[in-house]
Image (cartoon, rainbow, N blue to C red):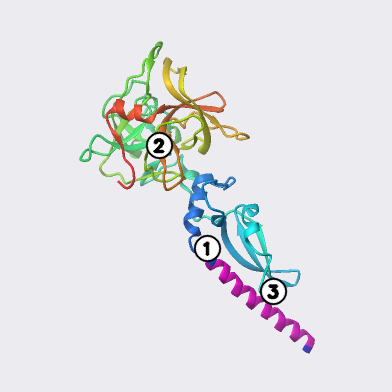
Amino acid sequence: MSGGHKITTEHRRDVSEAISLKEELSAEHLSSAGEFVADLIRYDEGETFASKEVKVESFIHAVGVQNRNSKATVVVYANRADRVRHNIPTVRYGTPIIVVESLPAILAIACSAIRDQRQRPIQLGISGGHKNVGYGTVGGFCRENEDSSLLVLSNNHVFANLNKGSRGDELYQPGSGHGGSAQDTFATLYKYETLHLDGITDNRVDAALGRVNDDIGYKNEICSIGRPRGIREAAEQMDVRKHGARTGLTRGRIEDISYDTVVGTSSGVAKFTNQIRITKEPRKPHIALPGDSGSLIVTGGSRNIRAVGLLFACGIGGSYAIANPLQAVLDTLMVELVVGNI
């Protein structure tokens, strides 16, 4: 009996020491980890969570205590164990420490999981479109000047139905292809740049604007990415990402910023000049698919998101995407992108 009591006492002491060490490690590594975990969730949304922009300490998102081999052991949970293991001692104060690879936890339903459903407030990167278009993607918020109404950006073929739309036409969120109807109207068509569909005349942008209804709530955040902070000129080898209504969050790399191409549409062929071509990540199935049109192409970390282009087309199978340079879009429509808080 006394022997069993001794073992129990020793075990309790081990546990107490392990808990004290856990609290010490938590204070060291978790005090500022929340913001980095948010970065990682936005950056990878459940894939690898391996951001090159985040410091080593940021990969630690939890610390616990477990009984391992009859010894109370502190367990450090990291998104990439190989990146933090060399910074964590294997023993401290006689208590063993191990590092385990694990993804961080998230609460509730990410907007990406319901990107094809009605969302209020409206945010960016989700399903929307002209009442007579299946669906595309709600791209960005814009204004003509500081005092003007809030406008919403996407492609002509998403918001203006390939030149067939008229000012005042209803824009649905979600798009009609996702069940949207008149009761889901969140904006009305305001203006668009006419697309030339003869296969000969040059097009520079595929862009349109809607005027957001006064009774609609909105937030200036791209689903699973964050709030745009400005714009940036595209450059070859720039790493970029987007969130679209069809494929959600994907990443790629710009390989061409002077790309001339012809694109097939249901109403003819459109020739585009000086576009941005983006290739998918290696070993990923696609960068974009039909329905992602209108997505903002962005670069930079979650605190410095810069919009680069407006996605409007993709290769068959989605191995590459094509985007209008965003500054060309804004100049053509004579608006400014809304950045930061609205």
Q: Earlier in the sequence, mark 3 or mark 1?
A: 1
Asked if residue 14 lies in the magenta stretch, the reply is yes
Q: Main secondary structure of the magenta part?
A: helix
Outermost residue, bottom direction? 2
Total marks placed: 3
Give the amino acid type for the residue marked by disc 3 in the picture.
Gly
User: In front here: 18 or 269?
Assistant: 18
Q: Nearer the viewer, mark 3 or mark 2?
A: 3
Give the amino acid type for the residue marked by disc 1 in the picture.
Leu
**Horizontal and vertical percent for residue 90?**
69, 65
Q: Which residues are magenta?
A: 3-27
Q: Secondary structure at mark 1?
A: loop
What residue sits right under mark 3 in the picture? 94
Q: Quadrant of residue 139?
A: top left
Q: Image point 64% across, 76% down: which residue?
A: 17
**Marks 3 and 2, Cα distance to the nearest angstrom?**
51 Å
Question: Looking at the figure, which quarter contains the N terminus?
Answer: bottom right
Q: Could you say which disc has been placed on residue 307 in the image? A: 2
Give the amino acid type for the residue marked by disc 2 in the picture.
Ala
Q: Could you say which disc has been placed on residue 44 in the image? A: none
Q: Earlier in the sequence, mark 3 or mark 2?
A: 3
Mark 2 and mark 1 residues within 8 Å of each other at the beta carbon:
no
**Marks 2 and 1, Cα distance to the nearest angstrom?**
31 Å
> Can residue 288 be seen by looking at this rendering?
no
Mark 2: few/some/many CA within 10 Å (<14, 14-19, 20+)? many
Mark 1: few/some/many CA within 10 Å (<14, 14-19, 20+)? some
Mark 3: few/some/many CA within 10 Å (<14, 14-19, 20+)? few
**Marks 3 and 1, Cα distance to the nearest angstrom?**
22 Å
Mark 3 and mark 1 residues within 8 Å of each other at the beta carbon:
no
Q: Quadrant of residue 316?
A: top right
Give left or right: position of 287 versus 270.
Answer: right
Q: Secondary structure at mark 2?
A: strand
